[in-house]
Amino acid sequence: MGLDFLTSNIENGEFSYAQVLGRSLSGHYKLDIRFFDEETKTAVLIETKQRFKEEDKAQLFAYVTLEKEYNIADNIIAILANTSNDKIQVWQIAKDKAAELLSDKKLKTIAEYAEYFKPQNKNDMSTVLENTSTLNKKLHDNGISESLRSQFVGTCLLALKNGLTYQDDMSTGQILEGIKEKLGVLLDKSMDKATKLAILQTKVLEDHKVKKLVPQNFCKLLDYIKENIMPYINAATSEGHDILSYFFTTFNKYVNKDDKNQAFTPNHIAHFMCKVADICKTTRILDPTCGSGTFLVQAMTMALNQCETDAERKGVKAHQIYGIEADQNVFGLATTNMLIHGDGNTNIKCSSCFDEEDWIKNTARVDVVLMNPPYNASKDQVPQTFAKTWGKTSTDPSKGLYFVQYIADCVGKGKLVTLLPMSSAIGLSGVIADIKEKLLDKHTLDAVFSLPAEMFYPGASAVACCMVFDLGRPHSDDKETFFGYFKNDGFEKRKGVGRVDVKNKWDEIEKEWLYLYTHKISKVGLSVVKHVTAEDEWCAEAYMETDYSTLSDADFIAKLQDYAAYLILNENE
């Protein structure tokens, strides 16, 4: 708890309220152990029993009443603790509020308990997206280029979150030096600190348009981020939203067509995939093509949500989150993003996953792989031995499946959950067929989920699926794979903000998807379980019984429109 905070005033280390109140008391007034932090006005009251019972709560709360009379403490933590084992029961009593029973199972330091009483920001996706749309216009008016906006906002947000000070009479150079100083402190113990700082400095702080910002306008941008973005971002939340991907969603509408091929994973789909992977506080996670860090943020948040002590949380951030990203611009986003969400950037490398086999095997030693590989990788993004097999084709004919095979073989154990375009799941010839066969020779195809057609809107137009592999176990003849037709996630397109869960349907939908998958249940219109081989299509549509009772004329028209759009998008392939 912290010996410096111990406040015993009688023998055996106990604390007498009669002594400090200056009068005799009857009943319970000798508390076993009391700690108090003067700075945060937090008192921790502990009553020990060999094995506490329900009636012991009355004794503990008699001390709470006396504590309020003596100290008028703003914050009280009241604890019943067994001496025969590690069982505890903990209540949080904030000023003028009823006691709240917590789920804590381990004792914490008084500093950790003081954190319980600090106001927390609220993650609010809709508000952040609306405000980001306004911010985008302000950045445009100040000459900040489209491709730089996500990283610029993320860098400013990170510096502000960590105490950046600025004022109108400062020069732009002074403001940028202040941001650089904050980044340096944050990255102090980070792997490849110099590389990360150099990227952020070169790509953001030294960009000529950023350096030309009028100081007063720079301050107004910082004010807007501080007042309209930062209050809605809570790094401690269990939701784990990738805030920078929200920025990307808004800013992506304005970038050129080539950049729109990037399929940044939506937060709710990343959350679902982490649930499928069964992330816990001891899981070691790798995203070998981590992009802005969406999977890493979600996985880290899910693991941290199960931690009870600072030591456990530090262990997760330092030893269980691993990422690789080849693109320097996007790597900068990932680093900034992880820092915004409470660090975890330590083990993110700016490299190609094909150059990091030893690091993956000997350093990361992961249990779970989460990934969304490039769907149209160029020849310089893959090993030349593979690129030479493409012939005249300029982009990866496997549509990302080669990345999956390489990482699956490299990791060799645990679970791999990946997003891929549907074409890689239904392909039955050429390089796709060869890779599917190689995958099943070493690994088991546990599940494939067909996902919403416009999942990446307004980014890439690819129709995606999610594949789940159990690594290191060949796909047996009696293995039945689960196929989910998970096309309706409840999200709807909204102008200016992308796809949004406007009717709050997602939580219930996700629960049903996970239940069907976990129990391998076949449900008409949603799922089917079937044995497949490398020679089969890997999608629910090929095997699932259609629920015709739900079909309407509107469904038929929508399907024709989808097919027409598909033909137009692929007319040049």
Image (cartoon, rainbow, N blue to C red):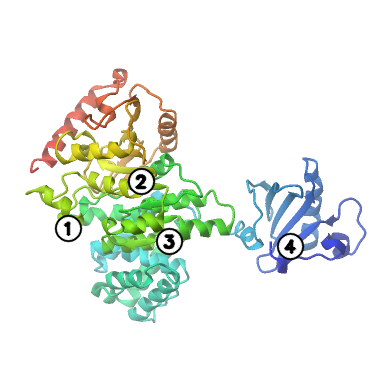
From this view, report whether residue 339 is shown above or below residue 260: below
Residue 286: x and y in percent read 38, 52
> Mark 3 and 4 residues: CB-CB less than 8 Å, in contact?
no
Which type of secondary structure does the marked residue at label 4 adopt?
strand
Count of labels in the image: 4
Q: Earlier in the sequence, mark 4 or mark 1?
A: 4
The kind of residue tagged 2 is Gly
Spatial CA distance of label 1 from label 3 is: 32 Å
Q: What residue lies at 49% left-to-right and 50% top-to-bottom?
A: 303
- Label 2, on which residue? 412
Q: Mark 1 — residue?
A: 380
In terms of secondary structure, where does tag 1 sit? helix
Task: Find disc 4 in the rendering and name its residue.
Answer: 35
Q: Alpha-carbon distance for marks 3 and 2?
A: 32 Å
Does residue 74 appear left or right of residue 477 in this picture?
right
Q: Where is residue 214 shown, x and y percent of the image?
A: 30, 76
Choose the circle earlier in sequence order: 1 or 3: 3
The residue identified by callout 3 is: 340
Amino acid type, residue under disc 3 in the picture: Ile
